């Protein structure tokens, strides 16, 4: 299991920081893991799963 920082999440998803936190507030994105203080990171596998769900939704909508 690997934890990734916000910069890597933004790079992987193509989303801006504000959009990521908006989706988190709407329960539409994986929640970050607190690391202490103000530091957080995301479970890389959960981000990859979220991306795959978006791809599957696209494929279903075009079927």
Image: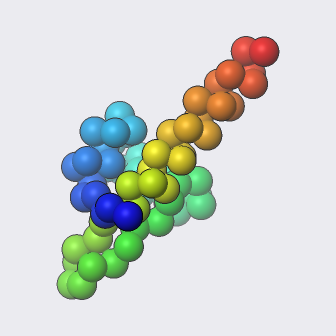
Residue that lies at the very extreme toward the top in this rendered image: 62
Residue 59 position in % (x across, y down): 68, 22
- The reply, left or right, for residue 31 in relation to residue 33 is right
For residue 59, above or below residue 3: above
Residue 57 position in % (x across, y down): 68, 31
- Which one is nearer the viewer's eye here, 63 or 22? 63
- Which one is nearer the viewer's eye here, 1 or 17? 1
- Which one is nearer the viewer's eye here, 24 or 49? 49
Residue at the (50%, 39%) spot, across then down: 51
Task: Using the rendered view, name the quadrant where residue 2 is placed.
Answer: bottom left
Residue that lies at the very extreme toward the bottom in this rendered image: 36
| The N terminus, quarter of image | bottom left
Residue 54 position in % (x across, y down): 59, 35
Residue 34 position in % (x across, y down): 33, 78
Residue that lies at the very extreme toward the front in this rendered image: 1
Task: Using the rendered view, name the quadrant where residue 41 is placed.
Answer: bottom left
Residue at the (61%, 40%) spot, across then down: 53
Total marks in image? 0
Look at the image and name its color scheme: rainbow
| The C terminus, quarter of image | top right
Residue at the (49%, 56%) spot, across then down: 46
Can residue 22 be seen here? no
Can residue 51 be seen here? yes
- The reply, left or right, for residue 54 in relation to residue 61 is left
Residue at the (53%, 47%) spot, across then down: 49
- The reply, left or right, for residue 41 in relation to residue 45 is left
For residue 56, above or below residue 18: above
């Amino acid at each position: 299991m690997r934890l990734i920082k916000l910069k890597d999440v933004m790079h992987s998803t193509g989303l801006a920081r504000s959009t990521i936190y908006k989706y988190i507030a709407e329960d539409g994105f994986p929640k970050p893991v607190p690391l202490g203080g103000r530091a957080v990171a995301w479970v890389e596998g959960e981000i990859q799963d979220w991306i795959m769900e978006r791809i599957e939704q696209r494929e279903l909508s075009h079927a």
